[in-house]
Image (tube, helix red, strand yellow):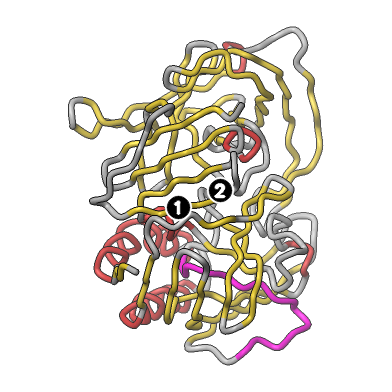
């Protein structure tokens, strides 16, 4: 067992990225001061976190309904925990684990609590209660003590994302804390193996692909009809690939070891095909809003990732999409080696 105490690194990460994302959203609300205080309390609690990883150990996960579930023991009870990476929008933001409980259940005793009132479009007001707690979380390949987590209760359970399936009885969600390691995410045998930064791993049979990890998310570069886009790597989305219909998206990359940001203009007309289908309806834009959207579904084989050409699948062009998104229908067709330390990603197509 190798022990990694990541408080200093995670503090910098959260301070520069997720926390300020949270603070930016909080500033829009009447209760901004309470939300900022809640967030800063969570950062102070992180001092007691103790994160241990069992490197090199291949551990199974459950892949069901285009979602990843990790068997975990949480405070001595075993659950299947939904693994969330690349959530679209604010997501959990603060806390490495989220427990979503029924609005009819009393919120357990917490280190800090906050209450919010939200107006949901086309629905009545909803009330959200959140609390900061420590959880002990253990699986086959990690052991976390005093993991800073958020327990949330809402007045209407229908707004809770359906990503966390019924198998996760109390709807536990773990965010991308595992990506702080080198991860071998294998869908060919549904296992996860973690390595530390100095480990040597075998990339035989794998293809190097262009990628970049930023505060806004972990992205993989693909070309669609010979046009390059940076797709958010999202285990939350169940789709194959999603693109805005019309959007100016920031697109950052490393050029000659220098960080460079540019813009990609997504225009549906550049990809339009005869057999495209148009769908109109409501979709969940966030946990607070349902929005009317017009979506175009396209079957294509004009997708390239690294040296892998003619990848076939459905692209969903949405009016309301904020950025290109790579979902689980795409991700699960490959085995992945994701090395955040060296900013390198390798993929292998599953036959």
Which of the numbered marks, if any, corresponds to residue 193?
1
Residue 245 left/right relative to 59 = right
**Residue lying at 63% horizontally and 37% vertically, measured from the top left:** 320
- Tell me if residue 197 comes above or below residue 230 in the rendering: below
Q: Which of the marked residues, 1 or 2, is nearer the chain's N terminus?
A: 2
Q: Position of residue 237 (x, y in %)?
A: 63, 44
**Residue lying at 75% horizontally and 64% vertically, measured from the top left:** 167
Which of the numbered marks, if any, corresponds to residue 320?
none
Q: CA distance from mark 1 to mark 2?
A: 26 Å
The stretch drawn in magenta includes residue 99: yes
Residue 248 left/right relative to 128 = left
Quadrant in which residue 4 is drawn: bottom left
- Tell me if residue 232 comes above or below residue 317 in the rendering: below
Foreground pick, 197 / 310: 197
Magenta extent? 94-108
Quadrant in which residue 181 is drawn: bottom left
- Tell me if residue 48 comes above or below residue 71 in the rendering: below
Most extreme residue toward the top is: 274
Q: Position of residue 261 (x, y in %)?
A: 30, 31
* SS at circle 1: strand
Secondary structure mainly formed by the magenta segment: loop
**Residue lying at 77% horizontally and 63% vertically, measured from the top left:** 166
The stretch drawn in magenta includes residue 10: no
**Mark 2 — residue?**
88
């Amino acid at each position: 067992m190798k022990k990694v105490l990541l408080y200093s690194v995670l503090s910098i990460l959260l301070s520069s990225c997720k926390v300020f994302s949270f603070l930016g959203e909080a500033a829009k609300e009447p209760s901004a001061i309470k939300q900022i205080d809640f967030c800063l309390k969570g950062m102070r609690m992180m001092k007691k976190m103790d994160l241990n990883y069992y490197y090199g150990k291949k551990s199974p996960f459950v892949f069901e309904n285009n979602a990843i579930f990790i068997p975990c023991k949480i405070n001595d009870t075993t659950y299947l925990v939904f693994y969330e990476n690349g959530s679209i929008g604010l997501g959990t933001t603060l806390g490495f684990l989220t427990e979503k409980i029924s609005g009819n259940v009393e919120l357990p005793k917490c280190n800090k609590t906050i209450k919010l009132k939200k107006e949901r479009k086309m629905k009545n007001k909803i009330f959200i209660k959140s609390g900061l707690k420590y959880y002990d979380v253990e699986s086959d390949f990690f052991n976390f003590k005093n993991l800073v987590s958020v327990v949330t209760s809402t007045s209407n359970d229908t707004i809770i994302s359906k990503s966390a399936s019924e198998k996760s009885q109390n709807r536990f969600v773990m965010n991308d804390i595992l990506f702080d390691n080198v991860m071998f995410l294998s869908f060919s045998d549904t296992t996860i193996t973690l390595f530390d930064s100095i480990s040597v791993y075998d990339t035989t049979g794998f293809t190097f692909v262009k990628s970049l990890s930023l505060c806004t998310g972990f992205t993989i570069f693909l070309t669609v009809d010979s046009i390059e886009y940076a797709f958010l790597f999202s285990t939350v989305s169940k789709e194959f690939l999603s693109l805005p219909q019309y959007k100016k998206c920031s697109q950052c990359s490393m050029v000659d070891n220098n960080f460079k940001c540019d813009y990609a203009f997504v225009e549906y007309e550049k990809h339009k095909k005869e057999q495209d289908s148009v769908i109109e309806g409501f979709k969940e834009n966030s946990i607070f809003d349902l929005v009317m959207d017009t979506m175009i579904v396209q079957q294509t084989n004009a997708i390239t990732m690294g040296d892998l050409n003619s990848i076939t699948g459905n692209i969903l062009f949405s009016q309301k999409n904020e950025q290109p998104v790579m979902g689980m229908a795409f991700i699960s067709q490959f085995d992945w080696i994701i090395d955040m330390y060296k900013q390198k990603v390798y993929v292998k197509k599953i036959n």
